[in-house]
Image (cartoon, rainbow, N blue to C red):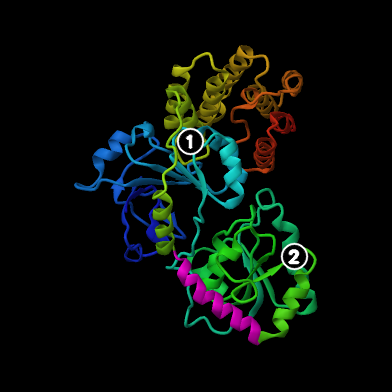
Amino acid sequence: MRLLCNLPLECFDDRAAMRGVELVTFGPPQRMVVDGVHYPFDVAFDPSAGSWHELAARLPRGFAPDAVLLFWPDQEPLPAGLEHCPVPVVGVVSDYNLSLPHLVGLWPFFDLLLCDRAGVGLFRRLSFADVRYWCQYAHKRPFHRLHVDAGARDVDLGFAGNLNPAVQRERAPWLERLRRLAVGGTRVEVQTGLRGEAYGRFLNRCRIGWNRSIRGEMNLRAFEVPACGALLLMERSNLEVADFFVPGEECVLHGDDDFEAVVAELLADRDRCTRIARAGHARVQRHRLGERLGQLADLLATPGQGRPASTEADRVLGRAIAMLPTWADGKTLAAAALAAHDLAPTDPRTLNLLGMATLRWRGAEGGEAAWRLWQRAAALDPDYLPATVNLVGLATASGDAELRRAARRERDRRAAATTWLAVDGPTLPFGYGELAVDRSLALQQAVRQGDPALFAGALVQD
């Protein structure tokens, strides 16, 4: 299988281990630094500014991909004109709990969309033609391994990861439960900001590595902990863990009601703890990314119905919205938004996007232009909500109380929006603060229940 990919997969595994796969990667030359290590791409190419035809022209002589594998389109821009790609285009999405409003318009681009088990039904509801479960994660072999000089495991229970309460809102109370175990004499360490070898060495100090997923998925830590020789302890409600490790033999699971008891039992029986950790370490070697790519070949051997029919306006708008949270520079993003507007100048969604892109590009200097664009979008459709939400955000930032009150009145008048078109569009603030995450989660709930009013209600919350 010949794969063209936008991620340097050797950050996870050696290319020699990707048996049966010929890999070519593409991206900006300095873009990909993983855990402090720069991984170069085979083909220097900026997908935010370039097209599929330009990328195809730069591929190594004689290399014709069997498929294009595109990771994380809410982080990595898609090339323009991707619909012209003559081979299957496979998308991989992960943190849709944070970025769903930016992903919903990408349905025209993928022959196959891969996600965690919980996301399959969600993305099928969002008109993606062929959505399947595939575990995209594995441990990064350069960092996650046994260190012979690591010394004794002097941490009974360890965790290292993101502590942002807006993103990891369900994890926060669990971390307090971890910390409270220290009162009884358990040696507990909770760390953040560790990367690369430092992270791997920390896990080498742990007897037990605690993990909790966000969406019931097998996340990175689920593989990193056993790869570093610690016992993997995670939630019993996880939807995927039993596909990879045998509970009680290669990992240990807990519930809301028995977490402390499970930890106590493990630490009271050090031989059992060590035995399970060793079994998990042995098993995780079979779950390296090189092996996982073979599963991808099996998925592609069963073709779906192909990319759904779409208009050029659909595609240009969807690509530009997805670029908003990526590393694409503001000027390039504004050009993509302008291209969407030129194709549909009376669509409030393109004016709303152009306002967002203008503000992202020019910052405060673009505020007046963004205000006018959002006013025009609101005037085009008396039910369209995102533009009025953005007017409130800009009015609030201006500090003008009367302007904010007037913008909120108009926004709240539209709060009963009951069609998907009326709520279709990105909103301020940029980034993944608490309000943005709340809205992404609300959109997920609305899609699952088929009720756009649930999302509308979240949009009018300050």
Q: Which residue is mark 2?
A: 255
* x and y percentages locating residue 189 in the rendered image: 66, 71
Give the crowd class for mark 1: few <14, some 14-19, many >=20 residues within 10 Å: many
Q: Secondary structure at mark 1?
A: helix
Q: Which residue is mark 1?
A: 323
Q: Viewed as shown, does residue 424 lie left or right of 106?
A: right
Badge number at residue 128? none
Q: Viewed as shown, does residue 107 lie left or right of 386?
A: left
Q: Earlier in the sequence, mark 1 or mark 2?
A: 2
Q: CA distance from mark 1 to mark 2?
A: 39 Å
Q: Nearer the viewer, residue 145 or 327?
A: 145
In the depicted structure, whether residue 161 falls above or below residue 156: above
State the extent of the magenta-drawn residues as a range. Answer: 271-288
In the depicted structure, whether residue 78 falls above or below residue 339: below
Residue shown at 69% from the left, 25% from the top: 392
Residue shown at 30% from the left, 39% from the top: 55
Q: Nearer the viewer, residue 189 or 279?
A: 279
Q: In this rendering, which labeled residue sits more in front, label 1 or label 2?
A: 2
Residue 64 in the magenta stretch? The answer is: no
The image quadrant of residue 184 is bottom right
